Image (spheres, rainbow, N blue to C red):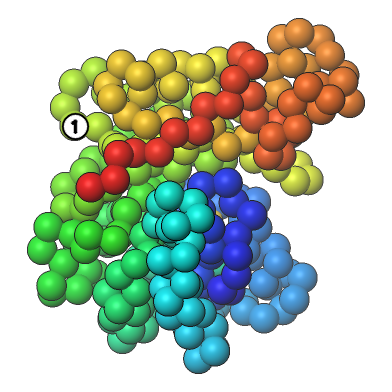
Amino acid sequence: MGENSKIEWCDHTFNPWIGCQKVSPGCDHCYAEAMMDHRYKKVQWGAHGERKRTSEQNWKKPIQWNAQARTFRKENGRRPRVFCASLADVFDNQVDSSWRQDLFALIRKCSNLDWLVVTKRPENIEKMLPSDWRGGYSNVWLGTTAEDQTRFDFRWKRLKKVPAVIRFISYEPALGPVRLPSNGFWPDWLISGGESGAGARTLRPQWVRDVIADCRRFGVAPFHKQWGSYHNNPLVVEKGMTARDAREIDAEGKGGGLVDGKLVREFPDQV
Ligand code: SF4
């Protein structure tokens, strides 16, 4: 709920509440549902399920991280990043709007932290933002998941209209090719990654190469997190190695993460 994160692109995760409803194929193997509903029976998932606010104690964790941010910055040369939320969606219609107001008040208060808010419901963002959002809080990066071209086209069209200091795409789990538009307006950052775990779906290495090439062409920072499974890793798929041999060469993330021998893990320029 509030913890130091193992996710490669952030330092902490914070969940203001838990519970959600599936909205697209990217949700089919929702980790949060598997853990919080099926395994621990903490929250019932779905339209008629619950949304449970996390404890007061949990809500105090970002305040501690904020207080420690100066030390973090000295040690790491950058601001700490918080992923919000991994077990819910901040722009979920079913959530009590007063909870979201409390969350944005916390975000404002924790100004030494960069908050990375990712949603699969960008169509809701504008109507759910706080009244003092204006050009976007300076410590909030807004992102939307796009698992395939259909979702990219729909969701980026909505996200790009919302003012924010950084706008980004989470192409994870990548379930089909995604290409960036050849003209118009581009995100600042794009994270890619394959699905992991039992029954993980296929990602083709060429999808990742193509979208990274688009990022290079249009000035978008690419971040390839992982292949998800060694069955997606190009060393196995294209070079014919066994998963065990591929792991010897590429042990980044789940299923390895090297793209043609290199890590591609860039971040957008901070404003
Ligand atoms: S939006 Fe995220 S948390 Fe909600 S069901 Fe989909 S994958 Fe799970």
Count of numbered marks:
1
Q: Toward the viewer: 72 or 210?
A: 72
Q: In the rendering, at what x and y percent does residue 22 appear?
A: 52, 59
Give the quadrant of the N terminus: bottom right
Element on which disc 1 rests:
loop
Judging by the rendered image, the residue that carries numbered circle 1 is 185
Does residue 51 sit above or below 34 in this rendering? Answer: below
CA neighbours of label 1 inside 10 A, class few (<14), some (14 to 19), many (20+): few
Q: Is residue 181 left or right of residue 78?
A: left
Horizontal arrangement in the rendering, residue 21 relative to residue 182 (left or right) = right
* Residue for point 34% across, 79% down: 106
- Can you tell which quarter of the image residue 235 is in? top right
Q: Residue type at mark 1: give it.
A: Phe
Residue depicted at 36% across the width and 60% down the height: 114
Residue 158 image position (x, y, % from top left): 23, 47
**Could you tell me residue 101's position as x and y percent?**
28, 81
